[in-house]
């Protein structure tokens, strides 16, 4: 959260957007709240922030070419799955389809860092995965390289479907971003140099910092730090990571050992 705040909310305007986004996300702790935060942050950025498009440099061009019909098809598939999977899950009552719906929706509606997906995944999988297993898997995911979205594989496996559930969850959470990238490529160069888009994205990025702060509070802080001793371990771990630059895997293992003996 601190690292993203330094780069995405470095001035008072964007810091204000970030705090406002955190407040809104905590007051509306549902999927609709996260979507509302992104939309409001984009509108505030559009009408309040100032930005100048980056200069167009020869070596700065993104030269991947995707035919427009392929891009449109990818966007249609994205929208079709977002609308169709909930209907299919409701009709079939199949756990595999339910997992595909849950994780595809999470990958579709979350914007920003991987931690933003935590509240959404927790609320959607609460009946399938216990809080203790959820937090244990989150800690393990923090200790290994790679994006936090790979946490989906662990959650899919813990639902009772094993490797099959892990594969379904992992593919479903990454598929929306892949479809959106293909869909946006033909329009990317024009969009990234449009002043209005630049201002809106600056607002969205600041809003993401607020979403991350809200996710840090709940579920990470409220459920991961239930008493004073847990707070002591968390504070020591933070200093080890931020000040001493200790590797995350070592901090997680050390905190686990301490927790075994004192919690």
Image (tube, rainbow, N blue to C red):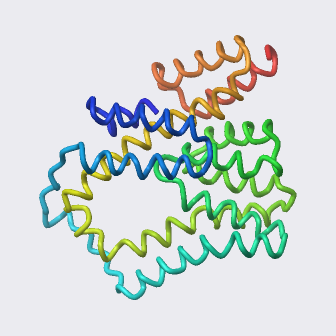
Q: Quadrant of residue 220?
A: top right
At a point 20% along the width and 62% down the height, the residue shown is 194
Q: Quadrant of residue 118?
A: top right
Residue 127 place in picture, x, y as percent: 82, 49
Residue 60 place in picture, x, y as percent: 20, 62
At a point 63% along the width and 54% down the height, the residue shown is 150
Q: How many marks?
A: 0
At a point 35% along the width and 81% down the height, the residue shown is 66
Q: Quadrant of residue 191?
A: bottom left
Residue 6 place in picture, x, y as percent: 34, 32
Q: Is residue 165 left or right of residue 101?
A: right
Work out which residue is located at the far right of the displayed protein and give it: 160
Q: Is residue 231 left or right of residue 38?
A: right
Residue 62 place in picture, x, y as percent: 27, 69
Q: Nearer the viewer, residue 200 or 59?
A: 200
At a point 13% along the width and 62% down the height, the residue shown is 57
The quarter of the picture where the C terminus appears is: top right
């Amino acid at each position: 959260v601190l690292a993203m705040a330094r780069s995405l909310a470095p001035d008072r305007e964007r810091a204000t957007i970030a705090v406002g986004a955190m407040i809104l996300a905590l007051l509306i702790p549902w999927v609709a709240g996260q979507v509302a935060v992104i939309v409001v942050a984009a509108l505030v950025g559009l009408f309040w922030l100032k930005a100048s498009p980056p200069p167009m440099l020869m070596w700065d061009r993104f030269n991947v070419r995707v035919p427009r019909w392929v891009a449109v098809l990818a966007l249609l598939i994205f929208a079709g799955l977002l609308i169709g999977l909930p209907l299919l899950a409701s009709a079939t009552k199949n756990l595999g389809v339910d997992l595909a719906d849950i994780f595809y929706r999470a990958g579709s509606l979350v914007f920003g860092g991987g931690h933003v997906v935590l509240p959404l995944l927790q609320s959607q999988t609460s009946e399938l995965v216990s809080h203790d297993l959820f937090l244990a898997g989150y800690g393990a995911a923090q200790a290994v390289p790679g994006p936090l979205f790979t946490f989906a594989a662990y959650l899919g496996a813990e639902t009772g479907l094993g490797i099959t559930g892990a594969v379904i969850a992992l593919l479903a959470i990454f598929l929306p971003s892949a479809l959106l990238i293909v869909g946006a490529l033909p329009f990317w160069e024009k969009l990234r140099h449009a002043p209005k888009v630049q201002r809106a994205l600056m607002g969205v990025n600041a809003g993401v910092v607020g979403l991350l702060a809200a996710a840090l509070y709940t579920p990470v802080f409220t459920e991961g730090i239930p008493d004073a001793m847990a707070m002591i371990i968390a504070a020591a771990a933070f200093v080890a990571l931020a000040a001493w630059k200790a590797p995350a895997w070592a901090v997680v293992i050390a905190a686990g050992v301490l927790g075994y003996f004192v919690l």
